[in-house]
């Protein structure tokens, strides 16, 4: 029968349709011992009537023809699966308490009395999925609808049709199906540049990130960020460095896949924390392509100096106290239950290859030598050590930030220690035997592929590179008898980069060694006597005698080492070639001592000034301007000590075409214009003191009056700075006293 109204707590109104098509009556189920009697919808046995009444009977497989039901394609009419054309409806007019019968449907139109609507006891699709998920360190049983939400909406709209067969509007937006609450995509195709500048000030490194893309997505209760960097390069910006590229992506070999992929990919997914002091990161994934790291000893200690390590005696004591304090704080934070803990079910740092090199220098500046002594590091040169760093993976970890850093540090320290033999076998004083073996192996593999020239090239490179390193180490040891001679010899070798420059440096080193041997006895004896008196005289005499032999021998070894280095540079494969610097080092002293924005012209002027003043970084650059262009190109560099006027783009020291004047000899700078034959010419006029002729005027032609005025202003400003510097009392640090 049809009840007049729906009653929530009345079990006799609850039905359940099984997957087999039977409609179970939930209110008539009876327990009989350990088994349950299931009552299902059925027909009465009275078939004489036109409309057959419905009843409930125990589930019986023999009565499948009258107990298995279906809904039509629209889900509105109920009929027996084995009897089509007859549908469930009320007997007569739909009224309270009328009987439910199975009647034959007439015509294509659906009569209103045959339309049924399914009303569920609880919201949902009726299909559940059970999952065990992690919410931080806690396991949570998650029970939810198995059918997607849009399917649930379709079922809901389907069941909400009216008794007359009319559908409700389906254009209503569901609040739960809206787009993500926030999504930010940042794509920097040209890249991102970062300058590292110390307190001198000088730029020590320049970081370039090209193809930088960030995708930030925030949904309800979850935030994710993906960072993709196509190209990474960190340049060593120190003056006259031997390793201009500090970190860059290793070029792939001929056999490796050359498909362009991102250098660094970082993915982080952060979940919603439900407890204080706990942050949940569902996923942390970092992947890197093969990288090359070329360390320079000076740059390494510059970074330590940048961190103010070993700055002075007082700072050393303070640094030790800070280290002890930070260690205790780390231990306390790890042990403390109130410290923020980070839960991550999936932490992955993928494996990658690292090609490591280290270049040392013979003489460090006093400030860097103090940092080296404070750290107690003794470094040795090596080159192109290929290290395979394995993946670091952890699941369901729950630690503090310091604990994570400590675990990662220990893991990679163990990786480096396990491959220490590779580093030891690549030291320069041993001739880099690992590199020699790698060159031989690479040559044999190319020979197997039919490349005979590749075999010769690799073997030649390996032998010449080993010979260059061994002879260079021996010659450096012989040059230790005279520090000044050793510094000059190192300066000659450090300027060589190409094969031709290595040969020229070798010849210069030979001449320098011979001249040093001829003058060693006199120069060393005089230097010792002037510094230490009689004791120094005899000490210098002994050093001079030794240097008479050692310096020429060192020169011969320099020639041999440079020749081998030239052969090695000429046979270097493309994979070993280092990328050029992205840009010149920044000049970091602006007007008034303020850090200026990057200027290509000032960077080029700073580079030229260091070539002209033999690398004296204490001399500041004030201006670098062009006076005239075209065929008669003239440029001027104004520094804090002097000015240079030259015609070449890259002048060299000692060039006779350079007009040079010290600011102390400069009286004034003016500009003037002259008109001849209807043509006006602008000149820059300098009044300079000549040692023999007194005050002299020099005129330099400029392309325009605007240029002449600007350059004149720069020169007069530099002259003012120079006068101020002369009148300023320079007190060494640590000797400042109070003036009452």
Image (cartoon, rainbow, N blue to C red):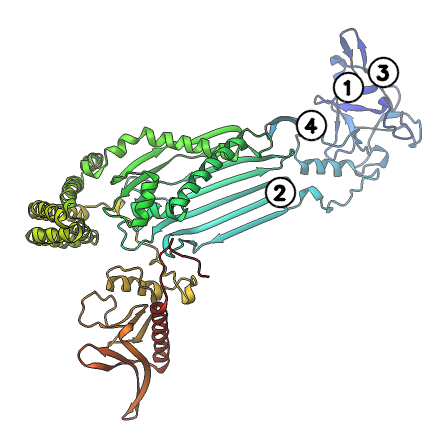
Across and down, in percent, residue 244 comes to 30, 51
Whichever of callouts 2 and 3 sits on the residue coming sooner in the sequence is: 3
Residue 92 located left or right of residue 709: right
Question: Which label sits in the foreground, 1 or 2?
Answer: 2
**Circle 3 SS class:** loop
Looking at the picture, tell me which residue is in the foreground, 146 or 401.
401
Q: Secondary structure at mark 4?
A: loop
The residue at which mark 3 appears reads as 45
Label 2, label 3: how far apart the Cα atoms are:
59 Å
x and y percentages locating residue 240 in the rendered image: 27, 54
Pick the front one: 254 or 641: 641
Using the image, determine if residue 496 lies above or below residue 155: below
Left or right, 389 with reference to 517: right
> On the image, numbered disc 1 is attached to which residue?
67
Determine which of the numbered discs, if any, sits on residue 219 in the image: 2
174 lies above or below 531 = above
Label 2 crowding class (10 Å Cα cut-off): few <14, some 14-19, many 20+? Answer: few
Q: Residue at x 77, y 19 (%)?
A: 67
Residue 412 appearing in the image? yes
């Amino acid at each position: 029968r049809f009840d007049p109204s729906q009653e929530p707590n009345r079990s006799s109104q609850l039905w359940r349709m099984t997957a087999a098509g039977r409609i179970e009556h939930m209110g008539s189920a009876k327990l009989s011992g350990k088994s349950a009697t299931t009552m299902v919808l059925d027909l009465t046995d009275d078939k004489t009537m036109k409309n057959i009444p419905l009843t409930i009977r125990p589930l019986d497989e023999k009565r499948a023809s009258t107990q298995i039901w279906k809904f039509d394609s629209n889900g509105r009419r109920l009929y027996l699966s084995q009897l089509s054309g007859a549908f469930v409806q009320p007997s007569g007019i739909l009224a309270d308490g009328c009987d439910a019968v199975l009647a034959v449907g007439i015509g294509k139109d659906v009569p209103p009395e045959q339309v049924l609507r399914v009303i569920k006891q609880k919201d949902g699709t009726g299909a559940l999925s059970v999952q065990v998920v992690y919410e931080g360190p806690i396991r949570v049983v998650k029970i939810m609808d198995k059918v997607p939400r849009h399917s649930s909406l379709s079922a809901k709209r389907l069941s909400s049709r009216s008794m007359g067969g009319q559908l409700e509007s389906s254009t209503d937006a569901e609040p739960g199906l809206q787009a993500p609450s926030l999504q930010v995509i940042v794509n920097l195709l040209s890249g991102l540049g970062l300058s590292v500048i110390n307190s001198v000030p000088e730029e020590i490194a320049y970081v370039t990130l090209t193809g930088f893309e960030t995708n930030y997505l925030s949904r309800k209760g979850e935030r994710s960020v993906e960072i993709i960097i196509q190209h990474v390069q960190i340049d060593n910006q120190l003056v006259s460095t031997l390793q201009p590229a500090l970190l860059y992506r290793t070029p792939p070999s001929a056999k490796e896949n050359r498909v362009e992929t991102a250098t660094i990919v970082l993915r982080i997914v952060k979940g919603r924390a439900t407890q204080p002091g706990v942050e949940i990161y569902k996923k942390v994934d970092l992947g890197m392509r093969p990288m090359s790291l070329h360390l320079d000893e000076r740059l390494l200690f510059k970074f330590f100096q940048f961190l103010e390590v070993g700055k002075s005696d007082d700072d050393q004591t303070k640094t030790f106290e800070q280290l002890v304090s930070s260690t205790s704080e780390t231990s306390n934070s790890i042990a403390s239950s109130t410290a923020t803990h980070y839960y991550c079910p999936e932490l992955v740092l993928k494996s990658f290859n690292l090609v490591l090199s280290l270049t040392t220098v013979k003489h460090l500046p006093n400030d860097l030598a103090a940092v080296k002594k404070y750290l107690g590091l003794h470094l040795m040169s090596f080159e192109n050590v290929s290290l395979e760093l394995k993946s670091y993976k952890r699941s369901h970890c729950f630690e503090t930030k310091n604990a994570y850093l400590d675990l990662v540090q220990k893991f990679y320290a163990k990786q480096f220690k396990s491959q220490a033999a590779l580093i030891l076998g690549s030291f320069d004083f041993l001739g880099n035997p690992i590199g020699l073996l790698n060159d031989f192996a690479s040559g044999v593999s190319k020979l197997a592929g039919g490349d005979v020239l590749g075999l010769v090239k690799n073997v030649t490179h390996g032998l010449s590179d080993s010979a260059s390193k061994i002879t260079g180490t021996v010659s450096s040891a012989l040059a230790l008898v005279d520090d000044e001679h050793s510094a000059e010899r190192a300066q000659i070798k450090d300027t060589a980069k190409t094969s031709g420059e290595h040969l020229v440096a070798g010849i210069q080193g030979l001449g320098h060694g011979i001249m040093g041997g001829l003058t060693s006895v006199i120069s060393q004896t005089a230097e010792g006597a002037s510094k230490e008196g009689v004791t120094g005289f005899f000490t210098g005499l002994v050093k001079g005698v030794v240097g008479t032999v050692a310096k020429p021998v060192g020169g011969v070894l320099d020639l041999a080492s440079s020749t081998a280095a030239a052969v090695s540079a000429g046979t270097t494969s493309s994979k070993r070639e280092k990328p050029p610097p992205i840009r010149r080092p920044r000049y970091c002293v602006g007007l008034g001592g303020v850090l200026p924005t990057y200027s290509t012209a000032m960077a080029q002027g700073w580079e030229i000034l260091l070539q002209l003043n033999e690398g004296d970084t204490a001399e500041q650059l004030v201006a670098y301007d062009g006076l005239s262009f075209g065929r008669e190109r003239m440029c001027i560099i104004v520094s804090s000590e002097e000015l240079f006027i030259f015609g070449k783009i890259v002048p060299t020291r000692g060039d006779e075409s350079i007009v040079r004047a010290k600011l102390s000899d400069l009286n004034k700078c003016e500009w003037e214009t002259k008109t001849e034959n209807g043509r006006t010419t602008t000149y820059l006029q300098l009044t300079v003191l000549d040692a023999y002729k007194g005050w002299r005027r020099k005129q330099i032609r400029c392309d325009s009056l605007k240029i002449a005025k600007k350059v004149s202003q720069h020169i007069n400003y530099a002259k003012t700075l120079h006068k101020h510097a002369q009148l300023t009392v320079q007190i060494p640090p640590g000797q400042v006293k109070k003036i009452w």
